[in-house]
Amino acid sequence: MKNNIKILTYSALLIAISIVIPIQFRFLRLEIGPFSATILSHLPLFLSMMISPFSALIVGVGSTLGFFLAGSAPWIVARASTHIVVGFVGAKLFKKGISFPTIIAITAPIHGGLELLAVLPWYGLNLYKLLVVVALGTVIHHGIDGTITYALSNTLSKATGKKFYENISINK
């Protein structure tokens, strides 16, 4: 029971952060329509993957909600909704014992492909915008946020003497 409360608390905190980032950190956003990258926007999602698949799902929903509440364009909100799938897949891989850097590498093309599909209704088959701007841009943004998350989780591990996920995860 105590572990469930920890999981719920950490998940709620990560949901809150995933909502606040697109609203309050617009200065960290780079936009090259239809692509946008808000640096750190994947951090709560990536941390939630270390907690559980359910945590990753709800943090992905929180991320989508955050971009919606920030007044983002509909294609940006649609792209944010891909975090639900990416987080779930990453959490399932983490549960299988796959290392976090490998998970980031595996989920990057999935993320890029899903975001490409998310913008199709607005941008049609403009291959340059779909493949280069959206898909490649997403993969690069995914990698940057993955690297930041990895460094942060290692820093937290050193500070606490335990791996980040050992305090809360059901993935042990």
Image (cartoon, rainbow, N blue to C red):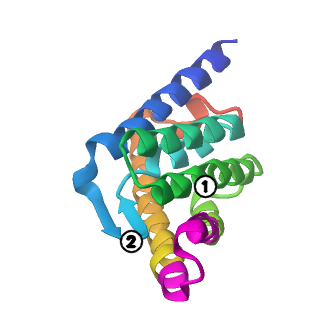
The quadrant of the rendering that contains the N terminus is top right
Q: Which residue is mark 1?
A: 82
> Secondary structure of the magenta portion, mostly?
helix
- Calculate the distance from the C-alpha at mark 1 to the C-alpha at mark 2: 17 Å
Q: Is residue 102 magenta?
A: no
Is the residue 139 above or below the residue 20 in the image? Answer: below
* Residue 93 visible here: yes
Kind of residue sitting beneath label 1? Thr
Q: Residue at x 44, y 52 (%)?
A: 149
**Which amino acid type corresponds to the residue marked 2 in the rendered image?**
Gly
Would you identify the image quadrant in which residue 54 lies? Answer: top right
Q: Secondary structure at mark 1?
A: helix
Left or right, residue 137 beside residue 58: left
Q: Answer with mark 1 or mark 2, whichever residue precedes in sequence.
A: 2
Q: Is residue 116 above or below residue 60?
A: below
Helix, strand or loop status at disc 2 = loop
Of tags 1 and 2, which is closer to the observer? Answer: 2
Mark 1–mark 2 contact, CB under 8 Å? no
Looking at the image, residue 74 sits to the left or right of residue 32; the answer is right
Task: Kindly identify the residue that appears in the image at 64 percent across and 55 percent down.
Answer: 86
Q: Residue furthest top?
A: 1
Which percent across, then down, holds residue 112? 58, 70
The boundaries of the magenta stretch are 112-132
How many numbered marks, from 0 up? Answer: 2
Q: Residue 62's x, y, as percent?
A: 52, 37
In the picture provided, is 29 more to the left or to the right than 41? Answer: left
Most foreground residue, 94 or 142: 142
Q: Residue at x 63, y 71 (%)?
A: 113
Name the spot of residue 92 as percent of width and height, x first: 74, 49
The picture places residue 121, in percent across and down from the top left corner, at: 59, 67
Q: What residue did someone put label 2 on?
A: 33
